[in-house]
Image (tube, rainbow, N blue to C red):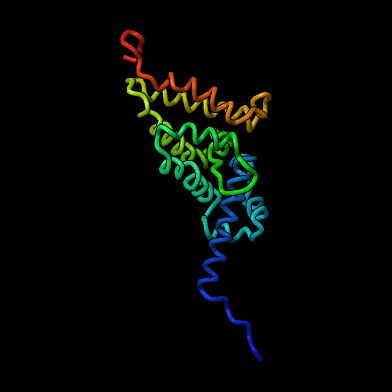
């Protein structure tokens, strides 16, 4: 009588990688939809279709999972995107999000989670500071950090009104039109002030 043999190591690695990916995608979407505090380990595991014990095996904790979601989303986007393209890339990501695929939803996670629990605060603060630092160098003005904060506030405000509040007409506006209006105005923020205009 033959006994079932264990799957080969390569197959086990593929299965583990697929399970890990499903958990990351489920967590990304639930954090973006409900915020960190409103998302449970059980809910993440259920959406991923796996036993919640696997979440702890692969990520250690819900916070560990959040850290990886942010690292693979927002922080990876920062590393891969030139600073001068970062704002538009992040804006388009929020405006054109599809219901499928590995797209970045870190700013949505940030919007729904920041300030709502100490456990997530450090990870989210790190992402916000990384964006601010990247954007601050776009202006040669002495107040570049302030300008970067203003740009981030506008970006997050757009995300809040479109994805969280779902306020019309912004919620249903064409992404290209929103980008045209926003980016055209944003250029003034990065422009160096002329003598006597402030920022000295």
Q: Residue at x 48, y 28 (%)?
A: 152
Q: Please identify the quadrant where the N terminus is shown.
A: bottom right
Q: Residue at x 49, y 48 (%)?
A: 72
| x and y, in percent, of residue 36 in the image | 58, 42
| x and y, in percent, of residue 15 in the image | 57, 66
In the picture, measured across the screen, residue 198 lies left or right of residue 85, that is left
| x and y, in percent, of residue 8 in the image | 53, 76
Report the number of discs: 0
Can you say whether 195 is above or below 34 in the image?
A: above
In the picture, measured across the screen, residue 139 lies left or right of residue 172, that is left
Q: Quadrant of residue 176?
A: top right
| x and y, in percent, of residue 4 in the image | 63, 82
In the picture, measured across the screen, residue 171 lies left or right of residue 62, that is right
Q: Residue at x 67, y 29 (%)?
A: 172
* Residue furthest out toward the top: 196
Q: Quadrant of residue 200?
A: top left
Can you say whether 2 is above or below 117 in the image?
A: below
* Residue furthest out toward the bottom: 1
């Amino acid at each position: 009588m033959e006994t079932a043999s264990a799957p080969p190591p390569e197959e086990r690695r593929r299965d583990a990688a697929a399970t890990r990916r499903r958990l990351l995608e489920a967590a990304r979407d639930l954090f973006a939809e409900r915020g960190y505090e409103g998302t449970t380990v059980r809910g993440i595991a259920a959406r991923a279709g796996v036993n919640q014990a696997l979440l702890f095996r692969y990520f250690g904790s819900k916070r560990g999972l959040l850290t990886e979601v942010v690292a693979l989303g927002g922080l990876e986007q920062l590393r891969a995107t030139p600073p001068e393209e970062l704002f538009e890339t992040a804006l388009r990501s929020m405006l054109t999000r599809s219901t499928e695929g590995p797209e970045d939803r870190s700013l949505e996670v940030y919007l729904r989670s920041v300030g709502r629990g100490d456990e997530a605060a450090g990870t989210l603060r790190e992402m916000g500071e990384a964006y601010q630092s990247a954007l601050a160098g776009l202006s040669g003005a002495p107040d570049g950090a302030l300008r970067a904060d203003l740009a981030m506030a506008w970006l997050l405000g757009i995300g809040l009104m479109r994805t969280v509040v779902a306020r019309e007409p912004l919620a249903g506006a064409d992404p290209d039109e929103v980008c045209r209006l926003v980016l055209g105005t944003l250029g003034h923020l990065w422009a160096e002030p002329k003598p006597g205009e402030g920022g000295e």
